[in-house]
Amino acid sequence: MHIVVSTPNDINIAEFLGKKGTEGSITFYNRVVNDNVLVALYPQNTDANIIPLAKSMLVSDIIVISTANLDKLFGEIIIGASLLNKHIIFTDDNDIKKFINELNITNFEITSKDKLLDAIINYSATINKVNVEENARIDIDRAFPVKGVGTVALGIVTKGTIKVHDNLYHSTGNIVSVRSLQVHDVDIEQVSPKMRVGVALKGITHEQIESGDLLTKLKIPKIKELNAKLKFSFLTKNILKKEAPYQIVSNFMHVDASIIKEESDKTVFNLSRECTFEKNDEFLLVQNKTPRIIASGIVV
């Protein structure tokens, strides 16, 4: 079973859950426990930049929130987590029942650090199911050249299954071929959801790949106008402004956006560049002032 966890506000939890792997705006921590492979994501420099934090929560199924410091960052994280359809595990350092009740959080549990790993594995056993009918997809966080191999992209499988020699669409619209697949430095023939994977690709250079790009079995058209249904917390309701600059964060991708119009059942955004979105993709809407996380959204 493969498990992806966000640890947005405590590096000690990330280090407890795994050994440090690839580093960047998000640092990945990896651990194998019996038949379980756990990847924990820790966003760097969250005081200056909320986007890596949003990315880490979006791409994970479980968000582990430390209650050791009930500060401004904790407030932003609990608002963001409450807007996403994710399971939340709080540490038991402080009593946070007031926050949970105010934000109407229902999908959560509270545990001590020594029981944290068991809580993660037990919950993941209920959600780690593969739907082979879905459009198979890898969300990429980085790419680089490897001597003797070629272009390698790192990412997380978010839908379906992908095999060696499969032909996939890249976000550019180009077709690329899977030369090989690696999970935790081991060559495998097939990957499935929640796996942190390295993909050796034929037909594309690493310079053509950006963080947030997708590899998919079915081609996804690029769009510059996004229709979405938004969800607000009671703290951020009714603060949208048409002229204001926003950013849409969806898994490892982010893009500048502005509001074209608000309708009763949806909000229409103009994107600063063409992007690939699938129907029902989830995102966070953020801005560069407090409150930085404004809403979650579903692509319609």
Image (cartoon, rainbow, N blue to C red):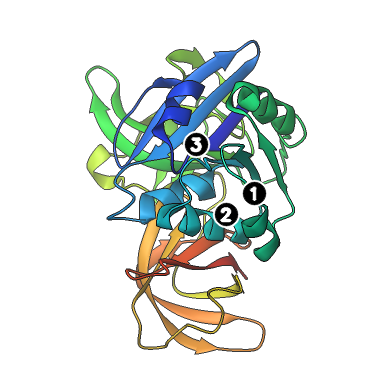
Query: In the rendered view, would you say 65 is above or below 223?
Result: above
* Callout 3 secondary element: strand
Residue behind mark 2: 81
Residues under numbered marks 2 and 1 in contact, where contact means CB atoms less than 8 Å apart: yes
Q: Look at 33% across and 28% down and name the residue there.
A: 22
- Left or right, 123 with reference to 256: right
Which one is earlier in the sequence, the residue at label 3 or at label 2?
2
Q: Distance between the residues labelled 2 and 1?
A: 7 Å
**Does residue 180 appear anywhere in the picture?**
no
The amino acid type of the residue labelled 2 equals Ala
- Left or right, 190 with reference to 152: right
Question: Residue most toward the front?
Answer: 95
Where residue 176 appears, as percent x and y from the top left, is 41, 39
Which one is earlier in the sequence, the residue at label 2 or at label 1?
2
Q: Identify which residue, 23 or 232, lies in the foreground.
A: 232
Residues under numbered marks 3 and 2 in contact, where contact means CB atoms less than 8 Å apart: no
Quarter residue 178 falls in? top left
**Crowding at label 2, few (<14), some or many (≥20) Cα neighbours within 10 Å?**
many
Quarter residue 2 falls in? top right
Q: Quadrant of the N terminus?
A: top right
**Crowding at label 1, few (<14), some or many (≥20) Cα neighbours within 10 Å?**
some
The amino acid type of the residue labelled 3 equals Ile
* Callout 1 secondary element: loop
Where residue 175 appears, as percent x and y from the top left, is 42, 44
Residue behind mark 1: 86
